Image (tube, rainbow, N blue to C red):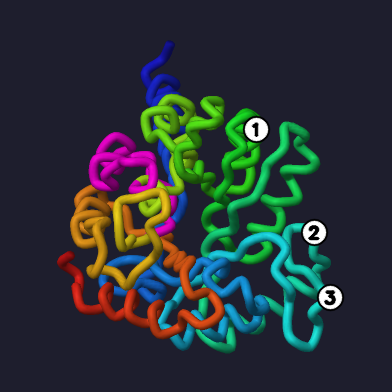
């Protein structure tokens, strides 16, 4: 092969490799949505006794800059019969986007939502995420990872495998175990990994920092919790007042270069927990950029 042709081929190959590398890494999180170096806000489930609009309002009142939606929450007090999820029409999605924009709250995640091996069904979830600018879809549908991986590559939206607590009566439920999540994601697209629910790890008898180290490089998102006791029945408390080593968890996030999205998911006193959520945000804020 002539030298000029070889140089041209090498140049084109280099460009292709650079493009591939850029494609397999989602864009960095903007500083405008970070608090103390982390893109952190609320999982709307924290306010599931209220509407989507109220959840956005409460997230802003708590000092959160981001929100994670979940499927099926009522839209607003004015339209309680309208449910918000990936089946919502464009006009409903636009209402939610406008509400978020008005309060400077950025949608960053969606879940926990089921994904299907049927591509058309899962595509609706990814199209919804893209329409909202969502960065990560959180699911427990390990069986649909082949389909999800194809759509991750198409839409450039991450997928996090979420964990609920270990189920002694159901050994087939395995996503509570970070080793299993690593096993099913390690050879996948780098935008597929774990949605680290730290409270559920504690309820499973695990230490969050240990779990994060197992999953290093595969943390896509997090539901961050502090529990009052290391028990299956342990309930949420303000960050830094429980047994979950929140400061150590955040330090490990920083060590791994993980900046979010992180969702405060406060599943206690859910009829009136805004002050507790504010306390969690104040703890994050108190750390500055050096947890």
Q: Which mark is residue 144?
A: 1
Q: Are marks 2 and 1 in contact (CB under 8 Å)?
A: no
The range drawn in magenta is 202-224
| Residue 213 among magenta residues | yes
Tell me how far mark 3 sits from mark 1, CA to CA: 30 Å
Q: Quadrant of residue 27?
A: bottom left
Tell me how far mark 2 sits from mark 3, CA to CA: 14 Å
Please identify the quadrant where the C terminus is shown. Answer: bottom left
Residue at image point 29% right, 80% down: 282
Residue at image point 52% right, 57% down: 135
Closest to the observer, 175 or 260: 175
Residue at image point 52% right, 64% down: 108
Residue at image point 26% right, 75% down: 283
Q: Are marks 3 and 1 in contact (CB under 8 Å)?
A: no
Q: Along the polypeptide, which appears first: circle 2 or circle 3?
A: 3
Residue 140, placed above or below residue 174? below
Residue 236 in the figure: left or right of residue 108: left
Q: Position of residue 156 (x, y in %)?
A: 56, 48
Q: Along the polypeptide, which appears first: circle 3 or circle 1?
A: 3
Q: Quadrant of residue 39?
A: bottom left
Q: Which residue is mark 2?
A: 87
**Label 3 environment density (alpha carbons within 10 Å; few <14, some 14–19, many ≥20):** few
Closest to the observer, 202 or 23: 202
| Residue 226 among magenta residues | no
Q: Which residue is mark 3?
A: 81
Which of the two marks, 2 or 3, is nearer to us in this view? 3
Residue 216, placed above or below residue 185? below
């Amino acid at each position: 092969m002539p030298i000029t042709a070889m140089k041209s081929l090498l140049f084109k190959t280099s460009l292709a490799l650079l493009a591939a590398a850029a494609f397999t890494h989602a864009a960095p999180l903007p500083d405008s949505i970070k608090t103390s170096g982390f893109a952190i806000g609320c999982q709307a489930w924290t306010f599931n006794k209220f509407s989507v609009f109220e959840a956005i309002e409460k997230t802003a009142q708590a000092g959160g800059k981001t929100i994670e939606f979940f499927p099926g929450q009522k839209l607003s007090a004015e339209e309680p019969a309208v449910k918000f999820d990936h089946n919502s029409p464009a006009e409903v999605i636009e209402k939610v986007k406008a509400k978020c924009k008005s309060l400077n709250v950025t949608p960053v995640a969606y879940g926990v939502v089921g994904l299907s091996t049927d591509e058309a069904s899962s595509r609706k979830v990814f199209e919804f995420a893209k329409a909202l600018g969502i960065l990560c879809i959180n699911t427990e549908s390990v069986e649909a990872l082949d389909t999800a991986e194809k759509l991750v590559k198409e839409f450039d939206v991450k997928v996090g495998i979420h964990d609920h607590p270990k189920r002694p009566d159901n050994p087939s439920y395995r996503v509570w175990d970070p080793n299993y999540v690593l096993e099913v994601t390690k050879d996948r697209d780098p935008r597929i990994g774990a949605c680290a629910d730290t409270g559920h790890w504690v309820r499973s008898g695990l230490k969050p920092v240990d779990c994060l180290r197992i999953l290093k490089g595969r943390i896509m998102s997090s539901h961050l919790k502090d529990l009052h006791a290391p028990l299956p029945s342990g309930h949420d408390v303000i960050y830094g007042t429980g047994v979950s080593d929140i400061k150590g968890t955040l330090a490990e996030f920083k060590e791994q270069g993980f900046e979010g999205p992180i969702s405060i998911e406060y599943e206690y006193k859910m009829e009136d927990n805004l002050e507790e959520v504010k306390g969690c945000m104040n703890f994050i804020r108190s750390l500055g950029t050096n947890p």
